Amino acid sequence: MKLEEIFQEASKLPEHDRAVLAAGLLGTLPPLLADEDEGIGEATLRSRELDEDPANGCTWAEIKQALGR
């Protein structure tokens, strides 16, 4: 069976079944990260810094106060 035929048949499934199928297929792929603005690297660095010294963090109340809320 060709890919296009599989797609056509899968498209006929109910929405829930298509979602389960899609999730199952995605689960078979290796993880891909697109990091156009290096945000993942920055987040990883900040997470590591917090793990090393939790005092570097701030509370949710401090964040809201800094934002003027």
Image (cartoon, rainbow, N blue to C red):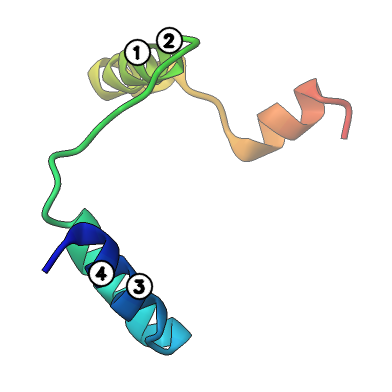
Closer to us: 12 or 55 = 12
Distance between the alpha carbons at the discs numbered 4 and 2: 39 Å
Q: Is label 1 in contact with label 2 (beta carbons under 8 Å)? A: yes
On the rendered structure, is 48 left or right of 14? left
> What residue type is disc 2 on?
Glu
Classify 19 as above or below 58.
below
Q: Secondary structure at mark 2?
A: loop
> What residue type is disc 4 on?
Glu
On the rendered structure, is 60 left or right of 31? right
Closer to us: 59 or 36 = 36
Q: Residue 49, percent across and down?
A: 32, 14
Label drawn at residue 41:
1
> What residue type is disc 3 on?
Gln
Q: Is label 3 in contact with label 4 (beta carbons under 8 Å)? A: yes
Classify 56 as above or below 14.
above
Label drawn at residue 28:
none
Q: Residue 53, percent across and down?
A: 30, 16
Q: Residue 3, percent across and down?
A: 21, 59
Distance between the alpha carbons at the discs numbered 2 and 3: 37 Å
Distance between the alpha carbons at the discs numbered 1 and 2: 5 Å
- Residue identifier under label 3: 8
Q: Residue furthest right?
A: 68
Label drawn at residue 5:
4
Q: Secondary structure at mark 1?
A: helix
Q: Is label 1 in contact with label 4 (beta carbons under 8 Å)? A: no
Residue at the spot 30% in from the left edge and 27% down from the top edge: 33
Distance between the alpha carbons at the discs numbered 3 and 4: 5 Å
